[in-house]
Amino acid sequence: MNHRDDGHPGESRARDGTPIGVYAGGVILAVFIALIVLFVVLPLFLVSIFFVIKTAVIGLIMGALGRLIVPGQQAIGLIATICCGWIGALVGGGIAHAAGLHWFASTLLTLGVAAASVALWDLSARKRVGGGRKLALGRGRW
């Protein structure tokens, strides 16, 4: 049997002559990386996905309530409604948190910011389109 003695005396070796410790180090590193991915990266990813879904739902609700507060018909779509509600939730919630307001006051502030963002978005959409609907004189309808 050809046996090289490059390492320490009594060290176990694989069939190709490589010390067993080299393989064990690689396995330990692979297990460590798998544990980091499983217990650190994956939960952070899931939390961020949950945050995006949660803010979209809250944005939809706050945007819809903001559209109900603003009088008249708004020329904005669903995505714009979600964005307005999301802006209202982030800005209103941030201001309420900084001011230390109670949850009810925070909700009212969030609704107010969402309604203001709906009104601003609608105003900018009407300017781009050309003024929105015009009154047809003599016919009594919009």
Image (cartoon, rainbow, N blue to C red):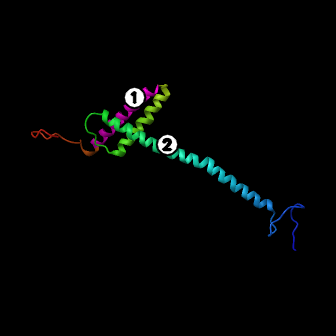
Q: Earlier in the sequence, mark 1 or mark 2?
A: 2
Question: Looking at this rendering, what residue extends furthest in the bottom direction?
Answer: 1
Give the residue at x 43% y 27%.
104
- The answer to which of 84 and 126 lies nearer the viewer is 84
Q: How busy is the neighbourhood of tag 1: few (under 14 within 10 Å), some, or many (20 plus)?
A: some
Which numbered marker is on residue 108? Answer: 1
* Mark sitting on residue 42: none
Picture quadrant where residue 69 is located? top left
Q: Is residue 15 left or right of residue 9?
A: left
From the viewer's side, name the closer residue of 82 and 35: 35
| The quadrant where residue 59 appears | top left
Q: Is residue 96 above or below residue 39?
A: above
Which residue occupies the extreme left position in the image?
A: 138
Which corner quadrant holds the C terminus?
Answer: top left
* Cα–Cα span, label 1 and label 2: 22 Å
Q: Position of residue 139 (x, y in %)?
A: 10, 40
- Dividing the picture into quadrants, the one containing residue 12 is bottom right
Residue at image mark 2? 51
Query: Does the magenta-highlighted stretch encompass residue 45?
Result: no
Q: Residue 109, percent across and down?
A: 40, 29
Q: Quadrant of the N terminus?
A: bottom right
Q: Nearer the viewer, residue 128 or 142?
A: 142
Q: Amino acid at mark 1?
A: Leu
In this rendered view, identify the residue nearer to me: 54 or 88: 54
| Magenta portion: prevailing SS class | helix
Task: Name the outermost residue toward the right.
Answer: 9
Q: Which residues are magenta?
A: 102-127
Residue kind at label 2, given as amino acid type: Phe
Q: Circles 1 and 2: CB distance less than 8 Å?
A: no
The answer to whether 105 appears left or right of 74 in the picture is right
Q: Residue at x 62, y 47 (%)?
A: 40
In the rendered image, residue 126 lying in the magenta stretch gets the answer yes
